Image: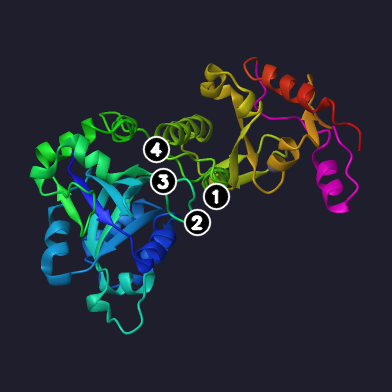
Amino acid sequence: MPQIVLQPCSDPQAQANLKKTMLQQISSQTILDQATDMDLSCRSYFERHPAVTIWGVKEKQGRPKVQWERMKKGDLVLFYAAGSFILIGTVDFKFTSPKLADYLWHEDGVSPEFSYKFLYVIKNPIPLYTDSFKSLSGGIASGPLFRKAQVGGEGLRDDGVVMGITVVSDSGAQKLISSSPTLQNYQQSFSGKRQKRIDFTDPKLEEQLEGLISTGLLKAGDVLRISKYRIEQGELRESMIRGREIVSCCICGEEFPATSIVTAHIKKRSRCSPSEMRDTNVVAPMCYLGCDHLFEHGYIVVGSDGIVKINREAKASGLKTRIKAVSGLSCLGINNNNTKYYAWHRKFHSQMIII
Ligand SMILES: [Zn+2]
């Protein structure tokens, strides 16, 4: 049973920190370069994870440090601001580094020793609010949750205000989880024996999530939808990349590092049935440097003979050159299971031959 860490982040400094290191990932190389005072045994964690989301707490009369010490791998963290929990994640790793904390969240006139040096890495962070970058609102209202879970006896205030970092264990944590469908959904999606994996190496996945978050399409408490989406994308990608470091783009045939290869939907995901969404044949590896764009916008299609064809003429010379370069090539990886999706793509874009 995980504990629940309530992590306040209401003040402007904390919200700036949240945007910097929780809503986006920090490369582990940066961490290895900056955290020169980190215990040497911690370095291998960052060598295994290319990028992480990270948070830190200050010492302040010893209390936050004591709470930080109680935190364990697998605990759920709820970030609190102005009456709501706005982001949920899972503790994955703890370490200390005043130098890194000062580098990530520098405060003028505060020496690194008094910085947010008690650090923790959070995996699977899911924002719960609607209006992400402007005002951090929405999420799970803390007051009603605490009252429903009857956690007053566990030292939590009935009005839901979280004053400092608080680790809720045992019965308190259990009561909170069983009183919130959002927490249950999150736990079911991200825990259990067979850990679901989210692959962040797809350059487009991050882009799409950013889009979802910044346009406000993400509704408060909509953890399940977004986490399922991430898992589904991760599984499709895993089946496509199969652990390879170098992957060929199926359109131009050129080799690329996996981080430059997009999990491209041959049939638009928004038009797929639930079973098609999970079909590993619905995606194909296309390069981020061009073919994915040409295919997604219908400039090119793949014919029933498996040959890449020009579908829309372009006026701009740059685009024209790219389209011409792939026209006539054989599309890689065509098989009986994905031809129907290429046919759908041809038909979908056939109305657009006008230009
Ligand atoms: Zn390509």
Q: Name the residue carrying label 2.
A: 133
Q: Residue at x 71, y 36 (%)?
A: 296
**Identity, as a three-letter code, of the amino acid under mark 2:** Phe
* Residue 91 horizontal/vertical position (percent): 26, 48
- Residue 214 is labelled as 1
- Residues at marks 2 and 1, CA–CA distance in whole angstroms: 7 Å
- Stretch in magenta: 311-335
Badge 4 residue CB within 8 Å of ligand 1? no
Q: Name the residue carrying label 3.
A: 138
**Identity, as a three-letter code, of the amino acid under mark 3:** Gly
Predominant secondary structure, magenta span: loop
Closer to the observer: label 3 or label 4? Answer: 3
**Identity, as a three-letter code, of the amino acid under mark 4:** Gly
- Name the outermost residue toward the bottom: 109
Pointers 1 and 3 in contact (C-beta within 8 Å) = no
Pointers 3 and 4 in contact (C-beta within 8 Å) = yes
Q: Name the residue carrying label 4.
A: 221
Position of 125 relative to 19 (above/below): above
Asked if residue 274 lies in the magenta stretch, the reply is no
Judged from the image, the secondary structure of the residue bearing numbered disc 2 is loop
Judged from the image, the secondary structure of the residue bearing numbered disc 4 is loop
Q: Which image quarter has ligand 1?
A: top right
- Say which label, 1 or 3, has the lower sequence index: 3
Pointers 2 and 1 in contact (C-beta within 8 Å) = yes
Q: Residue at x 22, y 78 (%)?
A: 113
- Residues at marks 2 and 4, CA–CA distance in whole angstroms: 17 Å
- Name the outermost residue toward the left: 153
Examine the image and state in which quarter residue 249 appears: top right
- Say which label, 2 or 4, has the lower sequence index: 2
Examine the image and state in which quarter residue 195 appears: top left
